[in-house]
């Protein structure tokens, strides 16, 4: 099989895998609607939630630009972009830990159950995305990549951008809808 054909097969398979990872989110979103309707707890700190989402959106842009830099043989640009994306991902997790620690939402309510489940699943996927980006970052720092050999970085970016999208949709559902 030709290398370009293999790469396209990898991309298709990975995107299909990522698409299947929407199932837990869709089920939790549906459950949230069934249990809570359009109720939003007045005790939520919406500014902290917005800051969490903003950090993830900017980190997704950083990761995308990092892979674009790699396509242009700019290894330093890739490393800087992935480093910024990972730091913003950690900021997101820190803000989420703050929200959980202050218990703005009581766990005992239906809304609280959905809130903690949904943000917990989002945090899990954020951790997986951070691990994937860290491994790609370390490999690139050690071996260097060229414009034709960066599948690991592209896969990590795809997974990360999936997590960003799911977290933003979850933010809208929990905080606004």
Image (cartoon, helix red, strand yellow):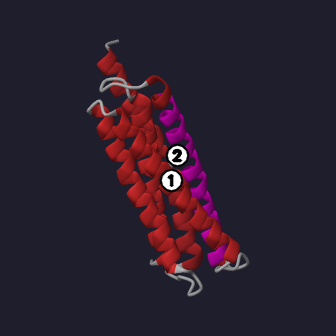
Which residue is at the front of the view, 66 or 168?
A: 66
Q: Give the range drawn in magenta.
A: 111-139
Relative height, residue 61 to residue 47 (above, below)? above
Q: Residue at x 57, y 45 (%)?
A: 128
Which residue is at the front of the view, 43 or 90?
A: 90
Could you classify mark 2 by the number of other residues whose Cα lies within 10 Å: few (under 14), some (14-19), or many (20 or more)? many
Question: Residue pushed farthest bottom?
Answer: 42
Could you classify mark 1 by the number of other residues whose Cα lies within 10 Å: few (under 14), some (14-19), or many (20 or more)? some
Relative height, residue 135 to residue 33 (above, below)? above
Circle 2 is placed at which residue position? Answer: 129
Residue 5: give x, y in percent of width and height: 31, 20
Total labels drawn: 2
SS at mark 1?
Answer: helix
Circle 1 is placed at which residue position? Answer: 87
Quadrant where the C terminus sits is bottom left
Question: Residue pushed farthest top?
Answer: 1
Q: Mark on residue 54?
A: none
């Amino acid at each position: 099989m030709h290398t370009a054909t293999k790469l396209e097969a990898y991309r298709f398979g990975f995107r299909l895998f990522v698409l299947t990872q929407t199932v837990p989110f869709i089920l939790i979103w549906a459950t949230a609607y069934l249990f809570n309707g359009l109720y939003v707890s007045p005790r939520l700190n919406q500014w902290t939630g917005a800051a969490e989402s903003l950090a993830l959106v900017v980190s997704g842009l950083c990761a995308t630009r990092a892979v674009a830099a790699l396509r242009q043989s700019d290894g330093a640009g890739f490393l800087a972009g992935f480093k910024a994306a990972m730091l913003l991902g950690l900021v997101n997790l820190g803000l989420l830990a703050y929200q959980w620690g202050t218990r703005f939402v009581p766990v005992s309510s239906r809304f609280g159950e959905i809130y903690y489940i949904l943000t917990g699943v989002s945090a899990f996927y954020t951790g997986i995305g951070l691990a994937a980006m860290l491994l790609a970052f370390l490999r690139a720092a050690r071996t260097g990549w060229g414009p034709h050999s960066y599948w690991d970085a592209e896969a990590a970016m795809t997974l990360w951008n999936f997590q960003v999208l799911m977290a933003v949709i979850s933010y809208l559902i929990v905080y606004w809808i």
